[in-house]
Image (tube, rainbow, N blue to C red):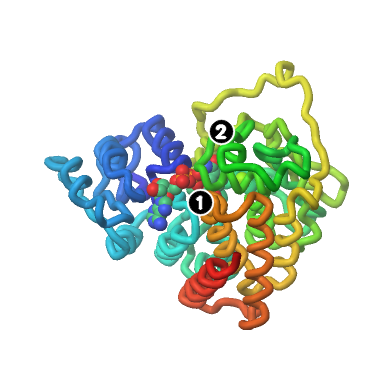
Amino acid sequence: MRRISVFGATGSIGESTFDLLMHMGGPAAFHTVALTGGRNATRLATMARALRAEVAVCADDTCLPALRDALAGSGIHAAAGAQAMQDAADRPVDWAMSAIVGAAGLQPGFQVLSQGATLALANKESLVTAGPLMLATAAAKGGRILPVDSEHSAIFQALTGEDISAVERIILTASGGALRDWPLDRLASAKVADALAHPNWSMGARITIDSASMFNKAMEVIETREFFDVAPDQIEVIIHPESLIHSMVGFHDGAIMAHLGAADMRHAIGYALNWPTRAPLPVARLDLANVGRLTFRAPDLARFPALRLAREVMEVRGMAGTVFNAAKEIALDKFISGQIGFMDMAGLVETTLARLSAETSLANAATSLDDVLAMDQLARLRASQST
Ligand code: NAD
Ligand code: MG
């Protein structure tokens, strides 16, 4: 029986993963090793009981009494805190879902790849902050990364049976987020609630705001560059408000392969769960006559400075992605807490990149996860100090 773990089980991707695991037979079909969550002990315990996990771990150690209570009599080990999270990721598995949000998702992903196991990667921060190191770890230890971000799953699927050298361009689709139709001069006054009203996808709060600012797409451009090893100028972004084409690959004979499906992350999660085969999934089928038409428009870089910053990050490479992600996380915290405005987030990231390139050798590649985590901390500090 396949041994699996889910890191970030209580989040949006984690819940969709749980739903699919249960749909595919739950404990009769999978041996669940570890489920982790942030601080929702009650939900984590319910999932752990349903899947009969070996261990359930909350990242926040104040949740331990509640988790123990909720798991009493189940035989499932309850644990909490940073060390327990690491121990959970060291337990042997065949497949693991990386669905923690933010840089906190890096460590367990590296641990799974170091085991030589398969990592279904939703945590895009991993490839943005430590892409080359992560791929090198996978290659050295025989581990494999399967993309779960819908765009990257789409590209991965469009590339099946193709030679990467035949690829001319990769076209990432973007919904444009909640504020795509706002006039440019109103964007500076956008509030958190405005940015959270995503037109098509239901996701965690942070990625939903990142969709409105296109920091999410900027991260995905960098993720594409790292995962598929294409040149930055081969990656294009197009706004596709219907969110039904999840991305496209253009080949040098002019053909374009597009991946379509309902806006439901269980497509990409299910693909990574069943790869290299396909299994029936409980997702809505597209009724194209009902959809009627698919539309596209070029992104306006004045509205979405994050896209320009992604290009600069790819040019420097090295640890620029680490700084970009860390500064973006701080900028997002500041926006959520009302300290800065919506359009100030990109400015804060740009300033932090400039400061760090002046005081460190940003272009030098990280040689260890410790290098990455140290740069991540420094960038957070500098971004916190900036206004
Ligand atoms: P979410 O906020 O809904 O869930 C995040 C999970 O991580 C929760 O289980 C939470 O408890 C846990 N967590 C949060 N902080 C933690 C910490 N410091 N230590 C340990 N655990 C922590 O997020 P999500 O929308 O499910 O996104 C998860 C990841 O997947 C992100 O990297 C996101 O960019 C990526 N992703 C999400 C979607 C989507 O549709 N939601 C699509 C593509 C990629
Ligand atoms: Mg995506």
Residue 101 or 115: which is nearer the viewer?
101
Say above or below: 28 vs 168: above
Residue 282 or 295: which is nearer the viewer?
295
Mark drawn on residue 264: 2
Residue 153 can be seen in this image:
no
Q: Secondary structure at mark 2?
A: loop
In the displayed image of the protein, which residue is found farthest to the top?
290
Q: Residue at x 37, y 33 (%)?
A: 22
Image-quadrant location for residue 75 = top left
Please identify the quadrant where the C terminus is shown.
bottom right
Image-quadrant location for residue 117 = bottom left
Q: Secondary structure at mark 1?
A: loop
Q: Residue at x 74, y 66 (%)?
A: 312
Q: Are marks 2 and 1 in contact (CB under 8 Å)?
A: no
- In this image, 241 relative to 107: left or right? right
On the image, the x and y values in percent for residue 122 come to 52, 49
- In this image, 39 relative to 150: left or right? left
| Amino acid type indicated by mark 1 | Ser
Q: Where is mark 1, residue-wise? A: 337
Say above or below: 385 vs 75: below
Residue 305 or 11: which is nearer the viewer?
305
On the image, the x and y values in percent for residue 181 come to 75, 35
Mark 1 CB in 8 Å range of ligand 1? no
Alpha-carbon span between mark 2 and mark 1: 29 Å
- In this image, 340 relative to 24: left or right? right
| Amino acid type indicated by mark 2 | Asp
Q: Residue at x 57, y 61 (%)?
A: 127
Q: Residue at x 52, y 55 (%)?
A: 333
Crowd band around label 2 with a 10 angstrom C-alpha radius: few (<14), some (14–19), many (20+): some
Image-quadrant location for residue 306 = bottom right
